[in-house]
Image (cartoon, rainbow, N blue to C red):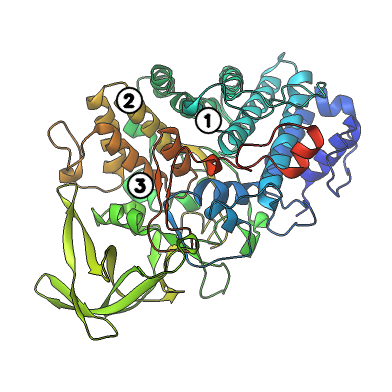
Amino acid sequence: MKTKFMHIIAALCLVLGLGSCNLDYFPDDELNSNVLLQDAKGGEYIMDGCYALLKDEVEFLGYASGNTYVRHYMQMTEFPADNTCLSSHTTDPLYEATAYMMTDNLKNVGTLWMIAYKVIFMTNTVIENMGTDDSDKRQILGEAYFMRALMHLHMVTLYAKPYSHGRENLGVPLHINTTDGTTKRNTVGECYDQIVKDLQMAADLLEGSRGNAGYPSKDAALGILSRVYLYMEDYDNCIKTVDQMLAGADPSSKIMSTADFATYFANTKTAKETLFCIAHEITDDTGQSSAGSMYYRDEIGKIGWGEIYPSVPLQYLYDRYPTDIRATSLFEPRILDESEEFIWFPDPETPNDQSGRMNLKFKVTKSGETYSFKDEDGTTYNVEKRTVNGEYFEYHVKYKGEDCVARITPKMEERNTHPKVYIKKLSFQDGNPMLCSPVMCRWGEVILNAAEAYARSGNDTKALEYVNIIRTRAGIPEEGLFAAGKMHGYSSVADVVMDERRLELAFEGHRMFDVYRNKQNMDRRYPGAQPWKIVEYTEPHIQYPIPNNEWTTSGIPQNPGY
């Protein structure tokens, strides 16, 4: 997709002699280097080019279709976690991310790296040349610092160990000027320190934004900063940053109403909830290659793959309160017949757990509150309704010697033995099932950043207050809120916050980072084509490999285990 902004990027590459900017675009504006790098309007063009780079299809290693930064980022952050069920193997490189089989020559691994550092170079040209003598220039300069920080944050969280695992671990190259020709891997601590500085500078320079939430603002910079402090376990500064954003306002005033939240993800560009998103227009629709195409299929228009569904553990979390709008408005279970019920559970005789486990499915009979079923051999099995956390429940069945977590549903459409539950969180902008403007930061996250910081620093009362704000907005009834002495079976407030983050931020690219930065293991023992295993937080493959064309050219060290 060739946009005006991509023409501007090409122009800038030519002006600066940036040989690595190998995009097949040519300048169509009469812009020279002085205008591009010193005038506020030229700076706008450069920054708009940065935003375009995050959503436009870019050729890399002969691969262009669907090769967008935002698609790869949303998949590479979400699919290695435990919120999704992949219904089958696929030749798309998303499978390697899902299965922890990443290699350094994968297109998604290399494309994300390439685009991020191109954006960083563009921002450096603005930072080095844009003055602060008027408000327009300050705004553009603030955007440049914001984007440089965001790209470095994406890189260090994907290609390096979490900050909590050690400041001295290998991070990623920090590029903070256009003149240093040396590429080296800075430490994780050095990367985070620079990201903090850039976000603080962005917050000082930015006031409003140049338009919708696709442009950074002061609150966008502070919102990302609150996340960075949380990842650094600097809980005091996380709380102070959120307090600065609130400026004495009630946190509940910053988020959308329950009714409006039902359509929020189709309207992220203009909603007050959004602090920053990758803004898409109708002309940016990439159809089958969109960020949401794996989650949803439009059965009328026959577009979208619809091959990834919410995992069984995540569905059980949402099941605790049937009024939870985060499921009722965003999930589309493909029910065929409400009058029949079936039980689904993972086949314990799956020969190779690396390939995941398929579902077994049997029609159930209900007698009172008790379910039972017969298998192909005519053997009758009773279904246990087992209490979880003292209040909630899961269905279990002991089948061929293994205790299996099960689901009971109406008769449903299925794909490769997996019941179809489409996810609409990345769909339906402008009514288009394949279009969205993926959120990079929003108020719901910021409030939960503060909640976790309060919980980790011992202020349980404040942590639960903030959690309850999010739960109330989600449509959870009064009896489902938390308080001291009303923990609903949870053993700690920190665990409450972790589950609330999972419910609120599912499919937005947070879960993998939340689990591993807290030194927890990822339990993926549920049906799907992803490996049936617990991924330990010490495993080297929780970080992506440095792309082959980077480490073989610059000589920087590869990540251990690759």
Helix, strand, or loop for circle 3? helix
- Where is residue 278, by image quadrant? top right
Pointer 2: residues within 10 angstroms few (<14), some, or many (20+)? some
Pointer 1: residues within 10 angstroms few (<14), some, or many (20+)? many
**Label 2: which residue?**
456
- Where is residue 526, by image quadrant? bottom left
Q: Which mark is residue 232?
A: none
Identify which amino acid the numbered label 1 is placed on: Ala
Q: Earlier in the sequence, mark 2 or mark 1?
A: 1
| Image quadrant in which the C terminus is located | top right
Identify which amino acid the numbered label 2 is placed on: Arg
Helix, strand, or loop for circle 2? helix
Where 148 sits versus 89, above or below?
A: above
| Image quadrant in which the N terminus is located | bottom right
Identify which amino acid the numbered label 3 is placed on: Leu
Pointer 3: residues within 10 angstroms few (<14), some, or many (20+)? many
**Label 1: which residue?**
220
Q: Position of residue 317 (x, y in %)?
A: 29, 52
User: Left or right of 246: which side holds 25?
Assistant: right
| Residue 314 appears in the figure | yes
Q: Earlier in the sequence, mark 2 or mark 3?
A: 2
Where 91 sits versus 445, above or below?
A: below
Mark 2 in CB contact with mark 1 (< 8 angstroms):
no
Mark 2 in CB contact with mark 3 (< 8 angstroms):
no
Q: Position of residue 273 (x, y in %)?
A: 44, 39
